[in-house]
Amino acid sequence: MPADQIKSAKGKLLEKPIDFLSVVEFLGGLVEKEVNFTHHLDSQTNILISISTALFLLSSSSFLGGNRDLSLLIISLFSGLSTLVGLLAVHPPRFMREHGQEESILFTKSISHFKSAKEFEEEVTRVVVDHEKIVSQYSLELYNLAKYYYRPKRTLFRWARNLLLLGIALGLFSFLIEILVKSSI
């Protein structure tokens, strides 16, 4: 959409009477939805870490206990890697979650950078009296949550899940080969 059409569309939008409380509730709902997605992903990651850790402990203890099957070694290695990547998904490394992005005043670090509660109060007051600033701060917070918080967690979760699935698939394949070789002897 060309810039003049955007301005025109925005002008038309602002010509209509807007219940700004509804706008704030809508934006708050979007932020809450993004936070809920992240909490759900964290729960999935915790389950994946538990399964990967259990598989790692069982397969590695069996392998080290004398059962030197290749399938156990494969499952042990991949489940161990999956556990490590899953642990990174809980708190992604800094290079994945911080790219020098602008922080909204809703962000905890932004709040703590103010010299006093009074200074923060003054900034909040400056924002809440201007509807465009409110929308801007909510939009900034929502964008940062999605791009720099949820997305790195999701990427690492997928890597951890795929490592575990690949390890199980390769372990199963190796196990079947071992059975075929042992039965043909």
Image (spheres, rainbow, N blue to C red):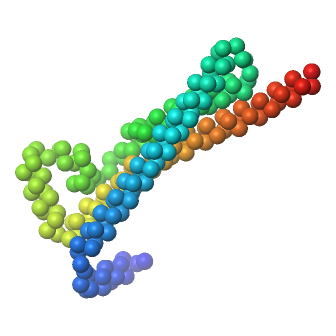
Question: Looking at the image, how many numbered discs can be counted on the residues?
Answer: 0
- Where residue 81 appears, as percent x and y from the top left, is 56, 31
Q: Residue at x 44, y 44 (%)?
A: 42
The one nearer the camera, 56 or 170, is: 56
Q: Quadrant of residue 125?
A: bottom left
- Whether residue 2 sits left or right of residue 11 in the image: it is right
The one nearer the camera, 51 or 135, is: 51
Image quadrant in which the C terminus is located: top right
Residue at the limit of the structure toward the left, as seen here: 118
The one nearer the camera, 168 or 104, is: 168
> Is 2 drawn above or below residue 75 in the view shown?
below
Image quadrant in which the N terminus is located: bottom left
Residue at the limit of the structure toward the right, as seen here: 184
The one nearer the camera, 123 or 177, is: 177
Q: Quadrant of residue 2?
A: bottom left
Q: Residue at x 13, y 57 (%)?
A: 123
Q: Is residue 82 visible?
A: no
- Where residue 101 appears, as percent x and y from the top left, is 32, 51
Residue at the limit of the structure toward the top, as seen here: 66
- Where residue 43 appears, as percent x and y from the top left, is 46, 44
- Whether residue 38 sits left or right of residue 75 in the image: it is left
> Is 74 drawn above or below residue 130 in the view shown?
above
Q: Quadrant of residue 15?
A: bottom left
- Whether residue 55 sits left or right of residue 69 in the image: it is left
Q: Is residue 132 visible?
A: yes
Q: Residue at x 39, y 44 (%)?
A: 97
- Where residue 142 appears, as percent x and y from the top left, is 34, 58
Q: Residue at x 39, y 57 (%)?
A: 34
